[in-house]
């Protein structure tokens, strides 16, 4: 694809998804703490498992002080069956402790401060900044990395490399929405193996890098 096609591609995908173009994190809440908690729970876990677990947990512990007051075994029971639920329960308690000690119980709107929290990487930090604070940031996960490389828009080896390239070429108006759109698109159409190219709304301009078998 040509670099100039990116706006057309993302607009077509947005129209294709319609009302479904809302990610799991946004469905739960746009509060920064809620976004942080939901994103931590979502790692290595499907959205249909993460969303109810996040709602259960945040109803019981809506802020860092309340989270820290809940014993780890109870937190683990609340978030089960998310992946690594015991480890994530301990992680969320430690994150809450540090938010209280360093930031007055608030989630900081700063990349470096977020990355200093245990278990928080660039993907989580960017999602907190974009979905929680409305700060332009590009959250790159496996879907964004795979699809933008499949389109030929970037040629990178890792999600971190993809983020850096996208920051230099993706129009700023798409920074906040690109993750949400491509995650949903990647799950429903542009899947890792045997993507649904026959029903893809942007197939006309996709160069299908690395695609062997498709449907």
Image (cartoon, helix red, strand yellow):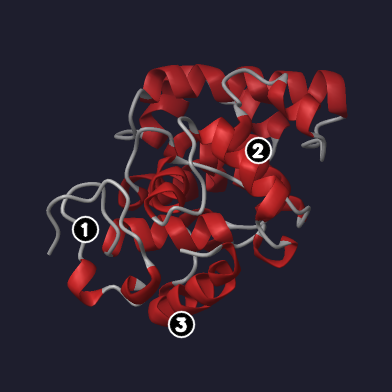
Where is residue 55? Give x, y as percent.
48, 50
Q: Element at badge 1?
A: loop
Query: Which mark is first along the chain, 3 or 1?
Result: 3
Tell me the quarter of the picture where residue 195 sits: bottom left
Tell me the quarter of the picture where residue 206 sits: bottom left
Q: In this view, does 110 lie to the left or right of 201?
A: right
Where is residue 121? Give x, y as percent.
60, 27
The residues tagged by marks 1 and 3 sit, at their Cα atoms, a distance apart of 19 Å
Query: Which mark is first along the chain, 1 or 2?
Result: 2
Q: Can residue 65 be seen in this view?
A: yes
Q: Which of 205 and 142 is in front in this view?
A: 205
The residues tagged by marks 2 and 1 sit, at their Cα atoms, a distance apart of 26 Å
Q: Which mark is residue 195?
A: 1
Where is residue 70? Give x, y as percent.
56, 25
Q: Which mark is residue 164?
A: 2
- Dot 3 crowding, Cα within 10 Å, few <14, some 14–19, many 20+: few
Q: Mark 3 points at which residue?
A: 15
Give the mark count.
3
- Dot 2 crowding, Cα within 10 Å, few <14, some 14–19, many 20+: few
Residue for point 32% across, 72% down: 203
Q: Nearer the viewer, residue 38 or 61?
A: 38
Q: Do the residues labelled 2 and 1 touch (CB within 8 Å)?
A: no
Is residue 71 placed above or below 138 in the rendered structure? above
Q: Element at badge 2?
A: helix
Residue for point 23% across, 51% down: 211
- Dot 1 crowding, Cα within 10 Å, few <14, some 14–19, many 20+: many
Q: Can residue 62 be seen in this view?
A: no
């Amino acid at each position: 694809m040509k670099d100039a096609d990116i706006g057309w591609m993302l607009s077509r995908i947005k129209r294709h998804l319609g009302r479904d173009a809302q990610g799991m994190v946004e469905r739960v809440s746009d509060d920064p703490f809620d976004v942080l908690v939901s994103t931590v729970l979502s790692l290595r876990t499907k959205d249909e498992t993460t969303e109810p677990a996040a709602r259960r947990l945040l109803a019981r512990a809506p802020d860092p002080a309340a989270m820290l007051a809940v014993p780890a075994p109870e937190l683990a029971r609340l978030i089960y069956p998310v992946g690594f639920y015991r480890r994530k329960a301990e992680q969320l308690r430690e994150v809450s402790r540090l938010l209280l000690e360093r930031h007055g119980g608030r989630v900081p709107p700063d990349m470096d401060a977020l990355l200093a929290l245990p278990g928080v990487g660039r993907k989580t930090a960017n999602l907190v900044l974009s979905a929680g604070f409305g700060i332009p940031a590009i959250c790159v996960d496996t879907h964004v990395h795979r699809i933008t490389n499949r389109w030929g828009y970037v040629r990178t080896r890792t999600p971190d490399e993809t983020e850096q390239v996208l920051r230099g070429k993706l129009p700023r108006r798409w920074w906040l929405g690109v993750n949400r759109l491509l995650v949903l698109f990647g799950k429903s159409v542009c899947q890792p193996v045997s993507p649904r190219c026959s029903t893809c709304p942007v197939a006309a301009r996709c160069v299908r890098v690395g695609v062997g078998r498709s449907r």
